[in-house]
Amino acid sequence: MKPFADRLVDAIRAKSSRVVVGLDPRLESLPEEFQRGVRRSQERAGEMVNEWGGRIIDLVAPHAVAVKPQIAFYEMLGPYGVVAYYGLCRYARKKGLLVIGDVKRGDVPDTAKAYATAHLESFDCDAITVNPFLGSDSVAPFVEAAKKNDAGLFVLVKTSNPGSGDFQDLPVNGRPLYELVAERVAQWGAELVGKSGYSSVGAVVGATHPEQSAAIRRLLPKSFFLVPGYGAQGATAADVKRSFNDDKMGAVVTASRSVIFAHEKDRSAPWDKAVENAAAKMKADINAALGA
Amino acid sequence: MKPFADRLVDAIRAKSSRVVVGLDPRLESLPEEFQRGVRRSQERAGEMVNEWGGRIIDLVAPHAVAVKPQIAFYEMLGPYGVVAYYGLCRYARKKGLLVIGDVKRGDVPDTAKAYATAHLESFDCDAITVNPFLGSDSVAPFVEAAKKNDAGLFVLVKTSNPGSGDFQDLPVNGRPLYELVAERVAQWGAELVGKSGYSSVGAVVGATHPEQSAAIRRLLPKSFFLVPGYGAQGATAADVKRSFNDDKMGAVVTASRSVIFAHEKDRSAPWDKAVENAAAKMKADINAALGA
């Protein structure tokens, strides 16, 4: 198998898309046909989430390079939710989508190794998100597992939430902490650069801070950015443009609610048509901003 | 129900123990009677882990105030492992132990809310560990859920791994980052102080850095510390002493391998006796260092 970064570049070229669709199964937002009985039991909710997720995967597969299931919303349903998460990761892969497990794991080295095995081997993910707060030795087992499995990582550098600055922006010898994290990401990813010129160790860089994205882009020319914040969180295609390199590569943009629950805002079409339209529109919108 | 911090104080008094036993099911270390078939399937491994964990809980219940299952080792076994995690949390509670889910979750506010619901409601945990890297708004939903459920949090302030200094020790205006995190923890926990005088928002502070523990203790007089690093990671009872207040409260010490896999080093007794001895010895060792 090719390294993750090269597979991502291939997918972007093949589909002419830089879109990642977040699979966040918020029960209250599921279309009516998937609502039946979800309050009755977590088992039933897990089944419905699995059915709904399969439909979403079918709908977005032509327009997205990857799906990004957010495991928090599955864990809410207890073990039954994790069963649904497992099934959807498998199914998305079968449908030719890359799977980015949004798990934001991070722990001391021994435990990090267990997490890496869990999410890059036991679950069918092509890449996962990683929290670097515990330091280099806590990220190393993830890098190791990524190498072994031709998988990818997206390390949190600058997140999209309003409070992200509380720690990530703090000045360390005159430079914001996120820049120092970015420099570490470059080191961690140096030995995982594929033929595409990109490393399989990427970064999460929120689109809600375009100036900072541009600065991080300069520090991490070889890393793919996973860019949240587009759509429901307010960032536009012009904002996300700062996350890309001049080759129009180096970033993928993720949206959840604005695509998977598009029917909540666009009631002119059946829910599935609304989802498909939203994914296609997002793809075109980003490509237009890039001139791609 | 009483707030978590008050329940923890009650348990410490009732059992005269400050011990938390980490439940990390490393398959290769399980006693022989739980090894049968664990490589055959994750389903079988999950069953064995569940049986083994139940025995450990029975053995340590008289000597420990809480167990701390590390979810990474369960996630390694895929959904079957999460089923075992779920079952063990339930069983430990039934046996009168507090359950600290070592999940180190952290995410943007909406997702953090999902994680908080997952781990403080869907899973039977009395408290969980939380990663603060995403900032105050990412921790707020956990604090909210802790308040609603009389549950507790242990926020990562200074972890026990050698690389913890990479980011946690960085100087911010002349002070290490972990001190700034500690000050936030004090703010987050201010409204969750119980009748015991302790807040249900605690901190993870590794015993492997005793000087730093003492400094953090001063910044967080009302927080319970969850102290890893004792035993297999090398810290002694004298080291962990710095994490306690003068009232001999304010901290609980966690050990995993050195207790649950005591049979690997102590082959003079059957495995279950070795585990029980190790838990009892750890309890006595810490109490002696404190003069409690």
Image (cartoon, coloured by chain):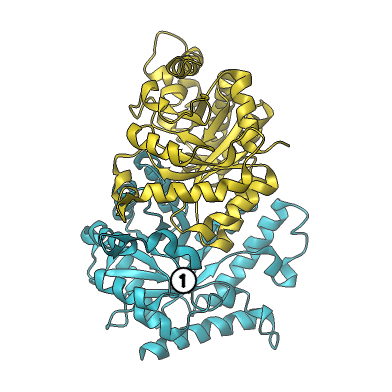
Chain colours: A cyan, B yellow
* Number of marks: 1
Crowd around label 1: few <14 · some 14–19 · many ≥20 (10 Å): many
In terms of depth relative to the viewer, which is nearer, A60 or B186? B186
Q: Position of residue B236 (x, y in %)?
A: 36, 23
The reply to whether residue A78 is in sight is: no
Q: In screen coordinates, is B191 left or right of A193?
A: right
Q: Position of residue B31 (x, y in %)?
A: 46, 22
Q: Residue at x 53, y 81 (%)?
A: A279
Q: Where does the N terminus of chain A fall, quadrant-wise?
A: bottom left
Q: Is residue A125 above or below residue A280?
A: above
Q: Residue at x 36, y 61 (%)?
A: A170
Q: Where does the C terminus of chain A fall, quadrant-wise?
A: bottom left
The amino acid type found where label 1 is placed reads Pro
Q: Residue at x 56, y 62 (%)?
A: B109
Q: Position of residue B178 (x, y in %)?
A: 38, 47
Q: Which residue is mark 1?
A: A228
The reply to whether residue B200 is in sight is: yes
In terms of depth relative to the viewer, which is nearer, A167 or A76? A167
